[in-house]
Amino acid sequence: MSERKNSEARIRANNKYNAKAYDWVNIAVPKGQKEVIQAHVKSRVKNVNSFINRAIDETMKRDTKSDK
């Protein structure tokens, strides 16, 4: 039997914090696109999540400017 990395209490604490601190958005991409995104992100930012958040922020700013 494999040993757990974190205790049950730590997992519950992390889940409780995540529920308070974050909203979750799941996206679907065409087959194979996930690997393309990961390869692009690998040399540029920390992780796919930060890349997607940056892309959303930049697009929203650009859209807001064009609405004026």
Image (spheres, grey):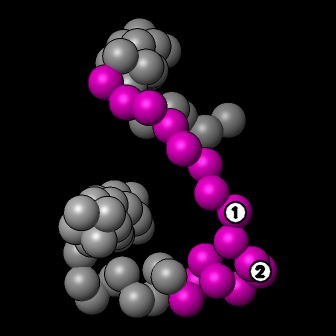
Relative to residue 34, is residue 60 drawn left or right? left
Q: Amino acid at mark 2?
A: Lys
| Left or right of residue 66, residue 26 in this image | right
**Tags 2 and 1 in contact by the CB under 8 Å rule?**
no
Magenta highlight range:
21-36
Residue 65: image x %, image y %?
Answer: 22, 67
Residue 31: mark: 2
Which quadrant does the N terminus fall into?
Answer: top right
Q: Is residue 19 above or below residue 42?
A: above
Query: Tag 1: Cα neighbours inside 10 Å, few (<14), some, or many (≥20)?
Result: few
Give the secondary structure at mark 1.
loop
The residue lying at 29 percent from left, 71 percent from top is: 66
Quadrant in the picture for residue 68: bottom left
Measuring from the top left, give residue 21's x and y in whole percent. 31, 24
Which amino acid does the dot numbered 1 rest on?
A: Ala
Residue beneath the point at 47% across and 80% down = 38
Mark 2, other Cα within 10 Å: few <14 / some 14–19 / many ≥20: few
Q: Residue at x 77, y 80 (%)?
A: 31
**Spot occupied by residue 6 in the image (x, y as percentages of width and height):** 41, 28
Is residue 21 visible in this depiction of the protein? Answer: yes
> Residue 36 falls in which quadrant of the image?
bottom right
Residues under labels 2 and 1: Cα distance?
A: 9 Å
Q: Main secondary structure of the magenta part?
A: loop
